[in-house]
Image (tube, rainbow, N blue to C red):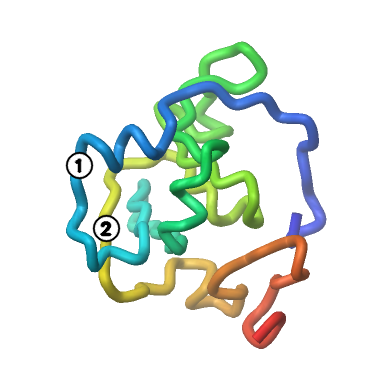
Amino acid sequence: CVTTWSRLDQRWEGIPFSKIVELAKPKPEAKFVIAHSEYGFTANTPIEFCMRDDCLIALRANGEPLTPEHGYPVRLVVPRLYAWKSAKWLRGIEFSAVDKPGFWERNGYNNRGDPWKEERYWGDGD
């Protein structure tokens, strides 16, 4: 992880994010997902990452219900991006036509956060 802490081999279980999109029916111009969590925390993600089959609203980790430390009651999990995009304590989802940098992005972290491109901080991968 970008903060030098990682927990590898997590097995997440929950609702595929594509099912949320199917139910919510966002407008076609929606290009970003803004996750709203406790304490005003937000995380922005390009919608194409959320539409992949491994993105989900997690209810369980490694066969156990989520704990408060790991995001109980639900957590957005976007496995192909750095973990700061996987918002804990999820309270709402916004579909937006415009990007709205989240908490970590406003504090210097890369706006997309693709680990395969080493996009950790603003300017990485641009």
The residue shown at (53%, 68%) is 104
Quarter assignment of residue 17: top left
Q: Is residue 95 left or right of residue 102?
A: left
The residue shown at (54%, 76%) is 107
Question: For mark 1, what is the residue?
Answer: 24
Dot 2: within a 10 Å radius of its alpha carbon, few (fewer than 14), some, or many (20 or more) residues?
A: many
Where's residue 5, x and y in %?
78, 49
Up the image or down, 67 lies above or below 18; here it is above
- Kind of residue indicated by mark 2: Phe
Residue in the foreground of this view, choosing between 90 and 56: 56
- Kind of residue indicated by mark 1: Ala
Label 1: state its secondary structure.
helix
The answer to whether mark 1 and mark 2 are in CB contact below 8 A is yes
Q: CA distance from mark 1 to mark 2?
A: 9 Å
Q: Is residue 5 left or right of residue 89?
A: right
Residue in the foreground of this view, choosing between 118 and 25: 25
Label 2: state its secondary structure.
strand
Q: Which mark is residue 49?
A: none
The residue shown at (71%, 29%) is 10
Up the image or down, 119 lies above or below 68; here it is below
Where's residue 20, x and y in %?
30, 37
Q: Is residue 100 left or right of residue 25?
A: right
Q: Which mark is residue 95?
A: 2
